[in-house]
Each structure stands twice: as structure tokens, then as C-alpha cells.
Image: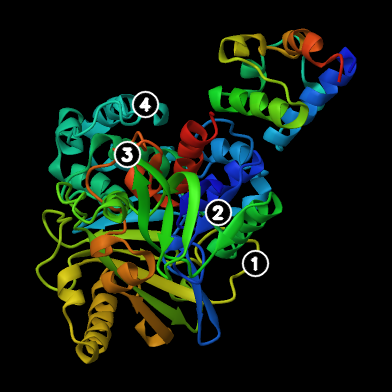
Amino acid sequence: MYDTIIIGAGMSGLAAGVRLAHYDQKVCILERHSVVGGLNSYYRQRGRNHDVGLHAVTNFQPKGVRKGPLARLLKQLRLAWDELGLVPQSGSSIRFPDLTLRFNNDFALLESEIRKRFPKETDGVQKLIGALVDYDDLGKTVNVSARSVVKEYIKSPLLTDMLFCPLMYYGSAIEDDMDFNQFSIMFRSIFLEGFARPMGGVRDLLRKLVNRFKEDGGELRTKAGVKRLLQRDNQVYGVELDNGEIIESRRVLSSAGWRETLGLCNPDASKQDKPGQLAFVETISVLDKQPKQFGHNDTIVFFNDSPKFAYHKPDDLVDLRSGVICSPNNFSYSQPLQDNVIRITALANFEKWHGLPQKEYALEKLRWYDRIAQSAARFVPDFRGSVIDTDMFTPTTITRFTGHENGAIYGAPVKQYSGQTPIKNLYVCGTDQGMVGIIGSLVSGITIANQYCLQN
Amino acid sequence: MTPAEIREAVLNILEDITPDEDLTQLKDDVPFREQLELDSMDFLDIVMELRKRYRIQIPEDEYKNLVTMDSTVKYLTPKMENL
């Protein structure tokens, strides 16, 4: 009999596991996939290491800053700042037709860009920052449209779209809008805090978490998918694995997603909640030279070619009008990375990809790789002559490896900030609890573990 | 444990929770919250570490005694002097 079973060995599940094992709970993490990491996993292909989805870690704060999610998770996981090996970004930009806003980890840059381009909006932006929800107050009010709040402070529709673009791409589960809690989290974590990357990608961090968990006596089982949650009298008492094995526990903490978790209790239970609709494709281009050698110095470029920025499920397989171009090479490392890479993200349609016959699927991946690269080359120096290897994930890939419905990376549109479920000793953490990104997921696992699994 | 040993025990816990802080400069009469910007999650961790390491139970309404090093040692002395 375990004290706690955790479903999913992604960032949130592992962080929760580290906390519980540290305080001597008998805890087991069950992961369906053979590799840990969930949405932030890694793989090896043709001799190269790739991260599944990592562009950058958000919420970056320099060493010595004691406030904010990064400082909190370091303390909670007993990690020294240096152990994460975070290297800050070089600088990023938001590129719209005829207008670019640059930003980096010092908010003063974005502020001065706004002052130059949108002089009348400077005060409004300041006031908006003052109105952002604090991390500790998240979820106190929900279902407030971020667009409706921002409209009170910023008049220019163009500036509004330009500010929303990075925040939506890196964390919105709602089409063409955000919940104001989510907007506040993303605004703080991207514009007020910033981007960084561990030199070795997500591998080092995952390894550290797994080692810490195991040293403290935690058990991690991979290739152990949970088929259903066992319950009586509105309480869970364990899980049944895909292979029929039954494991009992006093409580269950699930990072499988809100609807996905309710579905493990009762296949009909989740019907009333809406699944996420926002899915993405991502291309990976390995280059024969560093991006800066052909003039590309930005860490991340958020681009949009249309008068109005659209952030919703496209009709076609991919929406080429906007996207995110990330180069893992363009962080301030002390030495260059082994591989030179450009990653491009674009909005995609899950059903369209999911419905393709196998042969057609492979062909469409090739077609859209080319179109996406062409689309991106409008906003950054053309890298296509330097490509020596490629890969690509689609919404189907995400569902296959993470179990997230619709390939929805940011989960369901309505978040469950409390982490509680209709079942007494079943809790959720991770993306659907409300925090996204690596730092957000870790904080989510920590917070929910502290609140419900450690207090008694 | 003597008050000096209890202080050492608390210091060890603080070192674990805040590996990036230099605690040699810690002032015993200034609140932890002020010097180290500890938040409620950190105080909960101190309580849980004391429970894990020394089997001491601290009821929630007595957390307020863990303000400074001085007040913490004073509060813990009767609970830990026989350890």
C-alpha cells in the first residue's frame, strides 16, 4: 500500500514525487511511456540529442533573487541556483508586418521599444503591470477575459496583439483570448522575468529530479500506463495498470490532465468539460553552421504576417500566418552547443492530422516542413541552404506520447487551480492545474503535493 | 540538546532549504522573513524538517514562534532539551 501514487513522470509529477519522498512517504510514480519528461521529454535520432518541445525555460531570475516561482522551486526541491545551469537568452523579438518589438530579460528594453513605437501607450502598459494577478492569488477569480482587461489599459489593437502573441503561443489553452490569470502568469514569466536554457536541454534537469526522487526512496515505474482508477464510496484506493496489475494507495495525484483523469474514473465523467483545441506542429532543422554565422542572432522570434493575429484551430493542417522561431544556440553560453538548430512552431489542426492515413501522414509532414520553413524565412535570414537533418512533431505525436487529448499541449481551456476533483483523495497537478512551462509545472507539482499530500 | 545545539539544528535546516544563502551573517534577532525573505511555504518546510529529523510536532497555531532564530530556539528548547 502506497501513501501516494502519482500518474505521469513529467515535470509536475516528478516534482511532487521529490517532495513526498523527501518527507518519507511511500510513493510510486507511474509513467506509461518508456522515457520520463512528459511534454518536456527528450529523444535521440540519427546520432543527435533532441528535446521534445523545449524552446526556453521561462521565469528566469538571476542568482540571488529570492522571490518568484524560480526561487520558490529551488528552495522546495533543495536545489542550488547553479544546479539548474540556466543560461539567459541573447534577446528575442515580436515581428509583425512593418513593426518589430525587441525584448530580453531586462523589461526596460521592451518598455523603451513600446515608448518609441507606441508613445501614447507607455502609461497604460505600466498600469497593466500593476493590475496583473500575483502568483499567490491565482485562481481567486476565474473566467475573466484577458482581452477585456487589457483593453482598459492599452488602446492600440496592434500593440495588444503583439503583446498577446508570445504569451498565447507559450501558454494559452483558450482560442483568441486568455484567462486573465494565465495572461498574468505568462506576462510575468516572459516579459518581467525572462528566458533561459540549460545548456544540455531538459535531460540534466530530469535526471536530477529522478535521482533525487530515487535517493529518497521513491519508486519510478516506466511503461506502466494507468488504465483506470479504482474507487469505492467516492474515494480512490488504487489504480489498475494497462496490464491488469492492481496497485493500492491512500491517495492519487494525477498529471494526466483534467478530463483525462476524470476519464480514468468513469468514461462518462468528463463529458461536461471542454477539451483543449489548440495544437501545434514543430519542425526541427539541424544546420551545418551556427545561426549567428548567417546573421540570425535572436533567441526567439514570434512572427505574424496578418493585420490581425489569429490564435485558434486552423481549418487546414497548419496555419502558416504566424509562428515561433527558436534557436537553442542563441543563449549566452560560454561555449557553442554541439548541434546547430532552428525550431519552428505553428498552430495545427489535430483532427486533420489524426485523420490522415499513415502514408499520407508522412507525406504531409514533408510538405508542411517545407512550407513552414518558407514561412519562417520571411522573418529570419534564410537558413534553408544549411539544413543537414530534420524532424517534426505533429499533434498526433503529442497525443501518442503524452496522452493529452487533441494533442493540446496547454491542456483544457478551463483550469483547476485548486487541484481538487469531485473525488475526495484524488488531485490533479500539471498543465490543467493552471501553470504551464517547465517552471510552472514544477511549481504545480510542488504546490499540490504540499497542500494535499503532506499536510496529514 | 542545548540551546546552542538547537540553534545548529535549525541552521542546518535553513542551509538545506536555502542553499544559495550565506548564513554565516544571519542575525539571530532579525526575522527570517526579513533577512531571507522566507514565505509561508518555507516555514512549513522548517516545521516538516523538524518533524522528520527530531520527531517534533508543532501545531499550526504555534508557527508564529518561528520568527527569528532567537524566538525559534527559545520555543524549541523545552521540546528538544531531552533529545
Note whether A69 is above or below A37 in the view shown.
above
The mark lying in front, picked from 3 and 2, is 3
Between disc 3 and disc 4, whose residue precedes?
A: 4
Residue occupying image coordinates x 20% and y 29%: A153
Q: Tell me which corner region of the image, top left, top right, bottom left or bottom right, holds residue A406.
A: bottom left
Q: Are marks 4 and 1 in contact (CB under 8 Å)?
A: no
The mark lying in front, picked from 2 and 1, is 2
Circle 2 chain = A
Q: Which mark is residue A28?
A: 2
Mark 4 and mark 1: span between their CA atoms? 40 Å
Q: Are marks 2 and 1 in contact (CB under 8 Å)?
A: no
Residue type at mark 3 is Asn
Asked if one can make out residue A139 in the rendered structure from this viewpoint, the answer is: yes
Mark 2 and mark 4: span between their CA atoms? 31 Å
Q: Are marks 3 and 2 in contact (CB under 8 Å)?
A: no
Q: For the residues tagged 2 and 4, is the chain the same? A: yes
The mark lying in front, picked from 3 and 4, is 3
Q: Are marks 1 and 3 in contact (CB under 8 Å)?
A: no
Q: Tell me which corner region of the image, top left, top right, bottom left or bottom right, holds residue A349.
A: bottom left
Residue type at mark 1 is Gln
Residue occupying image coordinates x 70% and y 27%: B51
Element type where label 3 sits in the image:
loop
